[in-house]
Image: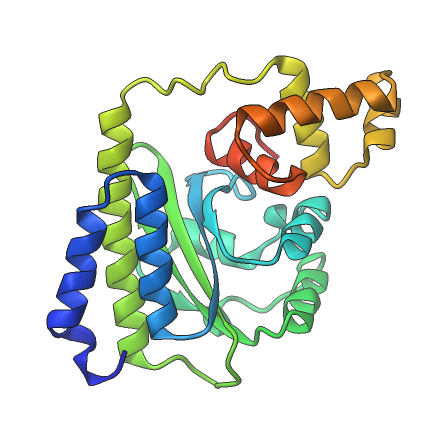
Amino acid sequence: MTAEVFGDRTMDTLEALLRARNMDDLATQFRNAVNELGDFYCVMGTMPKYRPGGLRPVLTTYPRAWIRHYLGNNYGRVDPLLRRALRSMTGFEWRSCDPISGPAVALTHDIFDLGLRNGFAVPIHGPDASVFYASFGQRENARTMPLRTRMALSMLVSQYYERFQQLNAAKGTDPTSDLLTPRECECLTWVAHGKTSGDIGDILMLTENTVNFHLKNAQRKLQCPNRISTVIRALALGLISV
């Protein structure tokens, strides 16, 4: 998207987001729009305003192996981007965060190994003590992200959030709130912390086959192809937390 970023084409894109019929349609429209702006990894979700590390993803394009690594190392609790988003009212480049120290150093090194040197984050502070958070990792070797790109990403996130809220409101009471059994939620929570079926069996005093049974049931109920996507969906629905 070049000089026309604020022209008719962009207005068509923003309108398409507002016309999305469901969450899947909204996610597809959003990913397509972001791909036109550049080569990014993206994650979006909601988190409590006063508790770092409580991000519940609703959309991500990061590799599954990275998501597993991030969750297994509890990086959400030390992620400087999440901490900055909780107190920032405007979008910010990753490089503008406070100096990194302590456990966050390992996270920074792992992000560099993933090929990301900079990015852009957009926080939207809601009225219900929550923050809607979107972050775009730049997969291009550039010292800074062009202003127009940052402005376009901010607009896309704002429009996504508006339609996201509308679709959630239209659903009313969430029919998935009691979709998983307590044991299925328990097993998924340990998967989010990087535990294997054998590890979970030892922790919960279950056989490995029983753990796999619960995880397969959760995967089937949430209509996900694997464990990691099941964890992400359960987090997004608020069925588990990490």
Task: Give the left or right position of residue 232, taking residue 106 as reference.
Answer: left
Choose between 201 and 80: the one closer to the eye: 201
Colouring mode (rainbow / by chain / secondary structure / one colour): rainbow
Task: Give the left or right position of residue 46, taking residue 125 as reference.
Answer: right
Question: Residue 165 location in percent, x, y?
Answer: 26, 37
Quadrant in which the N terminus is drawn: bottom left
Q: Is residue 127 visible?
A: no
Question: Residue 92 location in percent, x, y?
Answer: 38, 66
Task: Give the left or right position of residue 107, taking residue 123 as reference.
Answer: right
At 57% across and 31% down in the image, what residue appears?
241
Up-down relation of residue 217 to residue 198 (above or below): above
Question: Residue 108 location in percent, x, y?
Answer: 65, 66
Asked where in the image residue 22 lies, by quadrant, the reply is top left
Task: Give the left or right position of residue 39, taking residue 224 as reference.
Answer: left
Up-down relation of residue 69 to residue 116 (above or below): above
Up-down relation of residue 34 to residue 142 (above or below): above
Q: Is residue 112 visible?
A: yes
Up-down relation of residue 38 to residue 17 (above or below): below
Quadrant in which the C terminus is drawn: top right
At 59% across and 35% down in the image, what residue appears?
230
Choose between 24 and 176: the one closer to the eye: 24
Question: Residue 4 location in percent, x, y?
Answer: 17, 80
**Mark count:** 0
At 52% across and 75% down in the image, what residue appears?
139
